[in-house]
Image: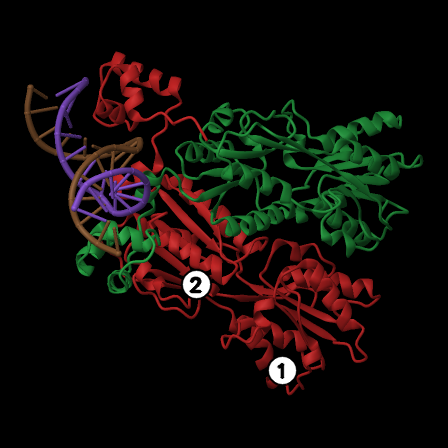
Chain colours: A green, B red, C brown, D purple
DNA sequence: CTGTTAGCGCGTTCAC
DNA sequence: GTGAACGCGCTAACAG
């Protein structure tokens, strides 16, 4: 369906040189050329609109100069931040970034397949939920510089970044409950509430907090909705309409917590006196709610570490050991608890 | 730095067949094989963890089975929706999706370069702001199935999707102003307020509405902040602290409008009686504000058309003419005006 | 400084 | 049904 793309050979013929010379000029190799030769080549390049074919180049050089970013969902502030930082570093290191959305089993399989087939030289796997079943993950590391953000997997030829959320969540929940709250709700991500046998740390913290404070668990207070700002608003609204509504709520995302605060205010109730709210993620928006949102999360939403690990690995000449970095979440008390 | 990846040749040797047979089996070609042959090949494939190299395959087949999505920013609901729909269609058509972030001149150049080099068979260019200067855009269409979402470019070997925003914005602004509002503010995107010589339709609509209603323009009422939920909150808060605060505000994004509503309520004022608010984009969240957000945008946030154009083009055997689809924005009145 | 040669890994003829 | 040979477009190594 399309006109054939010009190749180095076309350029070479037009410029009256060999393809090797074209390659040399285009790639800036080989020091100085005869100015006329170089100009003729460049003129031919621009006349034909030549650009080296990336497949051929990749095949020959055994590298693509691309890094892949696998994210489990879009519209999540933390992923947006990671994306931005990865792009920043990639620009500096001369790499491009290919973002792959991995929000289902099928897409995870497809994305790992692409990595396996050498579509990129390196990868950051941010939300490996759907990827972990596949033990190709480990074998990928033989061919690929890889950083995985996960708490359950061990470094094995690739680096791992862990986020310790549990302690901060526990601390936050302790303050949320504060000895006087009796009915504590949880608005979780869809995946939190799936029974995967691998409960999230946030959900675990919730469960443990109930026990620690001797509170009875009420399944009606555990709802989904943290993935979506609207859903969480309606979820909170629904909770408030219970005959015995919650007096505190832990939201698995700050986005949900912000919506929850609105829902509470719109219901004519007050935060934190009627219902206390604790979020998770520490996004900037937590500062514009009234009251400001208490949350757990990284003190600074920063993924410089991940990015550094990846590009160190890409630059390394020898195989690097699998490294492990642990980032500790903190409780950031503000007005909503 | 890494162990070499197994090739078809390795598989062939292990299975005791030729590389051609490996290729046939892996790609499901060539009808039936001796069941034993096929099994031996598949066993070797899985033992070695073989996957065909994508560069070599791309080079040979002259296609990558990938489509690229170029977006100008992340965290924008419309882009998120487009991303989701493109993935959906790509899965169905057997393509993968590579997302490229194009939020600066440099990255635009880099992304177009990649397309030029044949990294994908097709592309959707969503926010071509940074791409348009480059006339490679047209030449790309010779090699690439392409859909561009823009109002200023003409189809030329590629398809164009236009969004007519102006009329709906005018209608919305008319109701926003409603004969009695005297001081109408505009919270724009950063790019709206840059003097690019190509003002956005939303900004144009604002300017024209002021004139139409005989309102004096006050530069202090034109502020940036629509790109970010926090920024827009502070922007609105600042506007309310003016000696002569606005009694109406048009926000270039619904996200900003939602924040603006909260800023107004937090300032102890009421929407719409003290300050009326009009958003743009028609996101779901407009339904959870109190009052619900009046907005302009697509009646249904749907990019099925774009996606359809792309895959039609990819499937076409003959060159297709450049097609043009126009989607009309509508004014969606709710409570905030 | 420039040209020649070889081969990256794969899919596709065409023989057998 | 299977294998041998070719070339996709490019770059690295070497020759001149």
Position in image of residue B70 (x %, y %): 46, 54
Q: Report the quarter where the C terminus of chain A lies.
A: top right
Q: Can residue A241 be seen in this view?
A: no
Q: In this view, does B255 lie to the left or right of B272?
A: left
**Mark 1 vs 2, N-terminal side:** 2
Q: How far apart are marks 1 and 2 (CA)?
A: 32 Å
Farthest-out residue, top:
B36
Farthest-out residue, right:
A180
- The residue lying at 38 percent from left, 55 percent from top is B113
Q: In this view, does A25 lie to the left or right of B191?
A: left
Q: Which mark is residue B210?
A: 1
**Residue B19 or A155: which is nearer the viewer?**
A155
- The residue lying at 73 percent from left, 53 percent from top is A285
Tell which subunit mark 2 falls on: B
| Category of crowding for the residue at label 1, using alpha-carbon neighbours closer than 10 angstroms: few (below 14), some (14–19), many (at least 20) | some
Q: What element carries label 2?
A: loop
Residue topped by disc 2: B131
**Residue A317 or A162: which is nearer the viewer?**
A317
């Amino acid at each position: 369906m399309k006109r054939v793309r010009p190749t180095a050979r076309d350029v070479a013929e037009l410029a009256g040189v060999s393809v090797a010379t074209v390659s040399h000029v285009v790639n800036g190799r080989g020091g100085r050329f005869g100015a006329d030769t170089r100009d003729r080549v460049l003129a031919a390049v621009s006349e034909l609109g030549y650009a080296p074919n990336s497949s051929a180049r990749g095949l020959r050089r055994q590298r693509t100069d691309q890094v892949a970013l696998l994210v489990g969902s879009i519209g999540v502030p933390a992923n947006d931040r990671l994306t931005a930082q990865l792009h920043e570093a990639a620009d500096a290191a001369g790499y491009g970034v290919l973002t792959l959305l991995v929000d289902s089993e099928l897409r995870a399989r497809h994305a790992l397949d692409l990595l396996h087939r050498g579509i990129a030289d390196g990868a950051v796997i941010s939300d490996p939920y759907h990827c972990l079943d596949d033990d190709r993950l480990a074998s990928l590391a033989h061919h690929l510089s890889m950083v995985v953000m996960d708490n359950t997997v061990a470094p094995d030829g690739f680096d791992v970044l862990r986020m310790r959320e549990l302690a901060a969540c526990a601390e936050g929940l302790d303050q949320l409950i504060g000895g006087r709250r009796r009915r504590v709700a949880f608005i979780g991500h869809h995946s939190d509430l799936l029974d995967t046998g691998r409960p999230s740390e946030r959900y675990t913290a919730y469960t443990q907090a109930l026990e620690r404070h001797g509170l009875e668990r009420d399944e009606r207070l555990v709802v989904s909705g943290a993935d979506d700002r609207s859903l969480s608003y309606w979820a909170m609204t629904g909770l408030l309409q219970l005959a015995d509504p919650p007096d505190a709520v832990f939201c698995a995302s700050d986005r949900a917590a912000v919506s929850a605060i609105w829902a509470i205010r719109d219901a004519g109730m007050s935060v934190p006196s009627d219902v206390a709210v604790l979020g998770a993620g520490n996004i900037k928006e937590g500062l514009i709610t009234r009251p400001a949102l208490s949350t757990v999360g990284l003190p600074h939403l920063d993924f410089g570490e991940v990015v550094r690990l990846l590009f160190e690995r890409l630059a390394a000449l020898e195989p690097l050991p699998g490294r492990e970095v642990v980032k500790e979440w903190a409780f950031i008390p503000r007005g909503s608890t």
